[in-house]
Image (cartoon, rainbow, N blue to C red):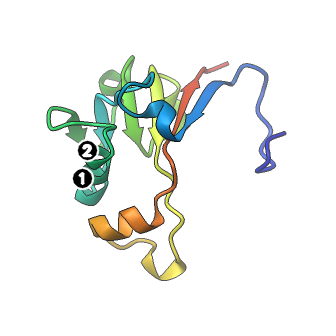
Amino acid sequence: MTRTGIRYAPGAVRKAQTGAAVKKGGNTMINLIVTRHPALVDYLRENGLANSTTEVIAHATPEVVRGKNVCGVLPHSLSCLTKSFTEIPLFLPAELRGKELTLEQVRQYAQPAVTYQINRL
């Protein structure tokens, strides 16, 4: 069991990295961003996780994410197809949930990036 209380099947999550381990020079450079939020894209670029040539899409399909280093919000049925999947946890107050955030708000509420390699069992 993890500190969050979630139980994972053996081998379900092979690897998780946080913070600097996923930045430029680490193991993962994102080559696909799945989001409808421009401020998140700016934040990823600002923090060296993506650059101006990184592909950005609003909706993912299996064909598009397969074998890529992806950042965004994906269902498990898609994240298990990626080479790696990175999330930027945002600890938002209730009043900001469901609203478009500014870059300043993303900076304020973003936690260190976490990258996973996920296998379908």
Residue at image coords 35%, 27%:
29
Q: In the image, is residue 106 above or below residue 19?
A: below
Classify residue 119 as left or right of residue 8.
left
Residue indicated by mark 2: 45
Residue at image coords 39%, 17%:
67
Residue 38 position in % (x across, y down): 23, 56
Q: Most extreme residue toward the left, as rendered?
A: 53
Q: In the image, is residue 51 above or below residue 69?
A: below
In the picture, the disc for residue 42 is 1
Q: Which amino acid does label 2 sit on?
A: Arg
Residue 107 position in % (x across, y down): 38, 62
Q: Most extreme residue toward the bottom, as rendered?
A: 95
Q: In which quarter of the image is the C terminus?
A: top right
Q: In which quarter of the image is the N terminus?
A: top right
Determine the CA span between mark 1 and mark 2: 5 Å
Classify residue 83 as left or right of residue 52.
right
**Front residue (pair 25, 99):** 25
Question: Could you tell me if the residues under marks 1 and 2 are in contact, i.e. CB atoms within 8 Å?
Answer: yes
Give the mark count: 2
Residue 17 position in % (x across, y down): 57, 32
Classify residue 36 as left or right of residue 82.
left
Quadrant in the picture for residue 23: top left
Circle 1 SS class = helix
Mark yes or no: residue 101 visible: no
Q: Which amino acid does label 1 sit on?
A: Asp
Q: How crowded is mark 2: few (under 14 residues within 10 Å), some or many (20 or more)?
A: some
Residue 27 position in % (x across, y down): 45, 21
Residue at image coords 76%, 33%:
8
Q: Most extreme residue toward the right, as rendered?
A: 1
Q: In the image, is residue 50 above or below residue 118?
A: below
